Image (spheres, helix red, strand yellow):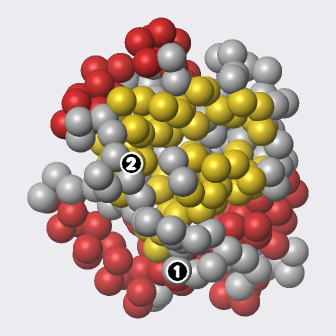
Amino acid sequence: MQKPNIYIFPQLTDNYGYLIKNPHENEGAIIDPSDLEMCEKILKLNDCSLTYILLTHHHDDHISAVSDLKKKYNCTVIGNESDELLPSLDLKVKTDQEISILNSKYRIISTPGHTMQHICYYNKDHHLLFAGDTLFSVGCGRMFEGTPEFFWESLSKIKLLDNKTLIYFGHEYTQSNVKFALSIDPNNSDLIEYGKWVERQYLDSRPTVPASLESELKINPFLRCDNSYFKNFFKSTNPVEIFKKMRAAKDTF
Ligand SMILES: [Zn+2]
């Protein structure tokens, strides 16, 4: 199976959109389109028409270009069958379902927490995860609808994926995430090194996406709520309790 190319493009203030396209083909899929002009630009730059739209969740900054793109390209819009706030869907999916998009398979992983119906799209063959606002580099999404139990369980599912997985996340928040992570984990040498790389990326106006799961497991505090360091730091043995405290600390950081 051919590995698809993933083209990263900025949307709105700090959102990322992704175009999935196979080499030598002229059909594409876009994840979470919110900026019509940028979506059209990336399609044109890659000489590509839009066949699919994949949605992770119902927030405006992930869906606001859907209806215009649908009108123009008549593409198939895909999202969680139980997310009633999504624009009208052509293909309704549910957890653990596998869908075939442009000759690649994607498994739907249900990840409640940021919203209750949030889903991620996982391509096992090519180790790709489109994580929306569930997981960011060195951080995770705000807990708008879920509970710490749900959110920690969602992150635990991601922790179990192949550690070669590259994570394509929804927002460029990495610099501020690193600052928070260093405030609670200041001696983590992997995090310190990563922070230096992030600074260089920002200076060069480069994205920090994709993040590798292997690296995130060492530096992302929200994936490490079951680690003895944070058990000690937050004085609890319960990862859910630790997640709750960590998320609350980040919200007011
Ligand atoms: Zn969101």
Q: Identify the residue at image location x=47%, y=39%.
A: 29
Residue displayed at 28% across by 67% down = 198
The amino acid type, in three-letter code, at marker 2 is Lys
Residue 58 in the image, given as x and y percentages of width and height? 65, 27
Q: Tell me how many marks there are.
A: 2
Query: What residue is drawn where x is 76% and y is 80%?
Result: 226
Q: Residues within 10 Å of mark 2 (few under 14, many from 20)?
A: many
> What residue would you read off at disc 2?
21
Mark nearer the viewer, 2 or 1: 2
Q: Is mark 1 within 8 Å of ligand 1?
A: no
Rendering quarter of residue 148: bottom right
Residue 134 in the image: above or below residue 182: above
Residue 38 visible in this rendered orientation of the protein: no
Q: CA distance from mark 2 to mark 1?
A: 21 Å
The location of residue 185, given as percent across then percent down, is 52, 79
Q: Is residue 170 left or right of residue 152?
A: left
Could you tell me the amino acid type at mark 1? Answer: Lys
Determine whether, in the image, residue 52 is placed left or right of residue 235. Answer: left
Quadrant hosting residue 199: bottom left
Label disc, if present, on residue 164 of the rendered structure = 1
